[in-house]
Amino acid sequence: MKRRHLQYGIGAAAILIAAILAAVYLAQRPTQALGILEGNGQVRGAEVTVSAKIGGVADIVAIREGQAMKAGDLIAAIASRELEARLREMRAQAAASENLLAELDAQLKVFDIAAEQAKAGADVTAGASLHEIHRESEALARANAEVAAAEAQSARDGAEHDRFEKLLAQGFISKNYFDEVATRRRVSEARLLAARRAREEAQAALEKARAASGEAAIKAKDVQRIAAERVRTQAARATAASQADAARARVAQIEAQLADTRILAPVDATVMAKLVEPGELVAPGRPLATLTNLKDLYVRVFVPERDIGKIRLGNPARISVDAFRGRAFSGKVTEIAQQAEFTPKDVHMQDEREKLVFGVKVAIDNPDGLLKPGMFADAKIKVDPNAAW
């Protein structure tokens, strides 16, 4: 009986002590100020993951974690020696195409002038032997000029052929490009042969005109010959123009690829993670760095369902972190969730019985960049304008 009374006494004493401790805890627990809602969470920011557009070896990595960057600053560079060599080759092809186009344009102008002169000569000298002799003399002069021009062009194309033949043997140009050079040489040689034959024809025509009449008919044929030559030259010019356009397009394409080898910061931000080292092989789309704008940070707190109706967009807030004790950073409510959720495991609520909460985003003023993503923060939101912090 005594033992039973003793057990009852011990149990009553334990209950009394627990009640006293609970009362002390409740008395000493900080109370939430009226008009102020409190919550906690982690400081976060909008992150930008910078990736590579093309693959290759990381030649330069110009960042370090914690580094502040401006939009356009270099993050990394992919080795581009092969692309640079291709660009030089494509630019050479484009320049050659442009030169050929210019030469054909000059020839077309010569043909236009020659055609006008031939027609005028035919009209003026029709029916007159003296005029016929004069006309054939002009034709011979033009033929001599064409031979001189063709000889000069053939000499240039022959020298270019010899020079690029050596470059082909050394592997500096492609076989396709050399074939284009060889084709131009054959064309110029054929043109020279044709010019010499035309000169011989002009000489024979002049001699014939001196022996007989019929200059008008010869002039008409000369006009037709020039017109035919102009048609052939016009067709060659159209082909050259297409080749020049294609060469310019290839140059622009390689220039764009070269630009993609330099990965630049898209916005003003701070490097939070460096994800590549010099010498590493980088695949297209691989992340190279993570950037965060430290002037655009926020903390997401969770408010009980019973209090969510008190909060409005724009409510002022104060945020504190352990790293800067005694200092409060100002902020304001910028987003309120429209749907409740269960309390996240990593969030502490003053009333642990709360199960459903609403997320509230609080933007933080961080002009000096002191706060960093990942810091745990406590936020106080003023829902009553007359409440004191």
Image: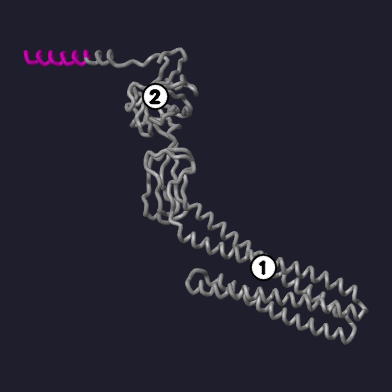
Which is nearer the eye, 234 or 333? 234
The rendered magenta stretch, by its main secondary structure, is classed as helix
Residues at badges 1 and 2 in contact (C-beta under 8 Å)? no
- Is residue 7 magenta-colored? yes
Q: What residue does disc 1 label?
A: 239
Colouring method of the image? one colour
Q: Quadrant of the N terminus?
A: top left
Q: Where is residue 365 in the image (x, y as percent from the top left)?
A: 44, 27
Can residue 95 be seen by looking at this rendering? yes
N-terminal-most mark, 1 or 2: 1
Q: Position of residue 342 (x, y in %)?
A: 38, 30
Q: Give the range drawn in magenta.
A: 1-20
Q: What residue does disc 2 label?
A: 319
- Is residue 277 magenta-colored? no
* Image position of 150 (left or right of 13): right
SS class, disc 1: helix
* Image position of 213 (left or right of 181): right
Amino acid marked by disc 1: Thr
Amino acid marked by disc 2: Ile
Can residue 340 be seen by looking at this rendering? no
Which is nearer the eye, 252 or 217? 217
Numbered label attached to residue 89:
none
Could you give the CA–CA distance between mark 1 and mark 2, rounded to whole angstroms? 71 Å
Q: Quadrant of the C terminus?
A: top left
